[in-house]
């Protein structure tokens, strides 16, 4: 099928590349010329395991193209994905101006022939009908006698950064929301190779469930899923804080409750809080939507409040160990909001850096991606070191912020040699306490 994906970020690029890989003819559009140039040269602007290889293969096979020409994209695609960002506004609601610009742009270029316009961006509930209106506005502005024919589908994305390619080929479910049977049928055809697990790790699994809903329910599913996961993490973090006080070990507690099939073991890792480009903004957007309709959320507010506190918990622990932080040097192991991504949006590291700076500490950091790529991501108030040994040099404490696998294998004994105080706060309960203690560290976890 002929597909156009508008927005080549974490979602759009992965979607475009994977749809081309399963055999569709895809054109990816972005209004960032630099990005398009990079993509055309075969390089991915984001770090995502496996993405560059698939991108290069599909480009070579002629199934994947990149352009900044929206008109060409609209002309090419029978299915037009909107996958631009919906960042948070200071009020908590989503900033939908990029979606609006694209919808207007689609309207400005629509001609004859039926099109399915797909909201893949996470958009406020009700955006399906809103996008339809904006597209029609874009058409009307041309003042031509046009007979456009299109439907809008909500197809929320559930991929996880760091395993986005895997998740696209091995989804737990595909959600399609629309009032149009014709549009749903085209989307089902588009996803057939994925539903039939032709590209799954385990092709013997039953087909991927496809959940067909109305537009608003599909939009709500995305928010409810992220809000649930964020709440689950805040829940275990609250339990961890109680464990800290009563002397229990939250890692054992999480194992004990996670084996209950009604609870499940995932998203029960206590730590220094959730962040990233999705959870914070999506939970706030849902709270905001509820408020717009006169409903005061209680559980979601609590999840956010627990998280706010959790994100500076490492500071409390540092103060307990080192007392005054002014003039001390703190080394952060990891910066990105989770491993295997270069995404720094709303990463807990940012809260830590800001608070440590406010308290007068010097902050250094080593991150496998940020340090190697030389990208500073506009970071300020932190010295980026190029290896873990240089990070440890002169530090009063280390804080593990991101659970990168390589942090399990560092030469911690060597690192302690150049440290002033041999303290490590394991912000993700990721490291092996015994290994760290035998290397000479005072090990402090979260809730254990
Ligand atoms: P992103 O910021 O990485 O990418 C957005 C892209 O859209 C950028 O490349 C930008 O240049 C481009 N863009 C902006 N305006 C444009 C325009 N007018 N025309 C063409 N291109 C334009 O965003 P993302 O992380 O990929 O997220 C996209 C959407 O998907 C968001 O709504 C997000 O909430 C949702 N989502 C993200 C994830 C994730 O893990 N990142 C997961 C699920 C859902």
Image (tube, rainbow, N blue to C red):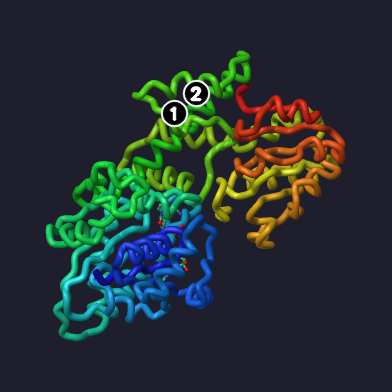
Residue 188, horizontal then vertical, whole percent:
20, 57
Q: Quadrant of ligand 1?
A: bottom left
User: In the displayed structure, does residue 182 sit left or right of residue 175?
Assistant: left
Q: Is residue 57 above or below residue 300?
A: below
Residue 28, horizontal then vertical, whole percent:
39, 71
> Which residue extends farthest bottom?
144
Q: Is residue 57 above or below residue 283?
A: below
User: In the displayed structure, does residue 28 sit left or right of residue 374?
Assistant: left
User: In the displayed structure, does residue 15 sit left or right of residue 74?
Assistant: right
Residue at 50 percent across and 27 percent down: it is 236
Residue 132, horizontal then vertical, whole percent:
23, 65
- Which is more toward the observer, 326 or 19? 19
- Which is more toward the observer, 201 or 27? 201
On the rendered image, what quadrant is the N terminus found in?
bottom left
Residue 114, horizontal then vertical, whole percent:
17, 72
Q: Earlier in the sequence, mark 2 or mark 1?
A: 2
Cβ–Cβ under 8 Å for marks 2 and 1: yes
């Amino acid at each position: 099928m002929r597909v156009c994906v508008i927005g080549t970020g974490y979602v759009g690029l992965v979607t475009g590349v994977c749809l081309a890989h399963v055999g569709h003819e895809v054109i990816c559009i972005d209004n960032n010329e630099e990005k398009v140039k990079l993509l055309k040269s075969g390089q991915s602007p984001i770090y995502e395991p496996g993405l560059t290889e698939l991108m290069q293969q599909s480009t070579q096979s002629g199934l994947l193209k990149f352009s900044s020409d929206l008109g060409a994209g609209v002309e090419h695609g029978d299915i037009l994905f909107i996958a631009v960002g919906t960042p948070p506004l200071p009020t908590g609601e989503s900033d939908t101006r990029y979606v609006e610009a694209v919808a207007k742009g689609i309207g400005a270029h629509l001609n004859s022939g039926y099109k399915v316009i797909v909201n893949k961006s996470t958009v406020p509930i009700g955006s399906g009908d809103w996008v339809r209106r904006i597209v029609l506005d874009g058409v009307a502005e041309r003042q031509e006698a046009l007979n456009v024919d299109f439907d809008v589908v909500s197809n929320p994305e559930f991929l996880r950064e760091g395993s986005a390619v895997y998740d696209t080929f091995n989804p737990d479910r595909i959600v399609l929301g629309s009032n149009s049977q014709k549009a749903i049928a085209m989307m089902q055809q588009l996803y057939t190779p994925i539903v039939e697990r032709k590209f799954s790790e385990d092709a013997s699994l039953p087909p991927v469930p496809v959940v067909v809903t109305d537009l608003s329910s599909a939009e709500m599913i995305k928010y409810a899923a992220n809000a649930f996961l964020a709440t689950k993490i805040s829940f275990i973090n609250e339990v961890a804080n109680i464990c800290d006080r009563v002397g229990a070990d939250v890692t054992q507690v999480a194992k004990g409750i996670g084996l209950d099939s009604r609870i499940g073991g995932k998203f029960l890792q206590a730590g220094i809080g959730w962040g990233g480009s999705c959870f914070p903004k999506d939970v706030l957007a849902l709270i905001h939507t509820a408020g717009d309709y006169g409903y005061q959320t209680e559980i979601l507010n609590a999840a956010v409040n627990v998280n706010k506190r959790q994100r500076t918990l490492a500071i409390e622990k540092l103060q307990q160990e080192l007392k005054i932080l002014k003039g001390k040097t703190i080394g952060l192991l990891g910066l990105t909001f989770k491993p295997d991504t270069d995404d720094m949006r709303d990463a807990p590291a940012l809260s830590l850096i800001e608070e440590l700076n406010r308290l007068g500490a010097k902050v250094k950091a080593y991150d496998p991606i940020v340090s190697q790529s030389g990208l500073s991501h506009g970071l300020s108030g932190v010295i980026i070191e190029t290896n873990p040994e240089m990070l440890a040099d002169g530090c009063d404490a280390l804080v593990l912020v991101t659970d990168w696998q390589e942090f399990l294998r560092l030469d911690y004994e060597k690192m302690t040699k150049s440290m002033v105080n041999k303290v490590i706060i394991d912000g993700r309960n990721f490291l092996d306490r015994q290994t760290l203690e035998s290397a000479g560290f005072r090990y402090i976890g979260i809730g254990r």
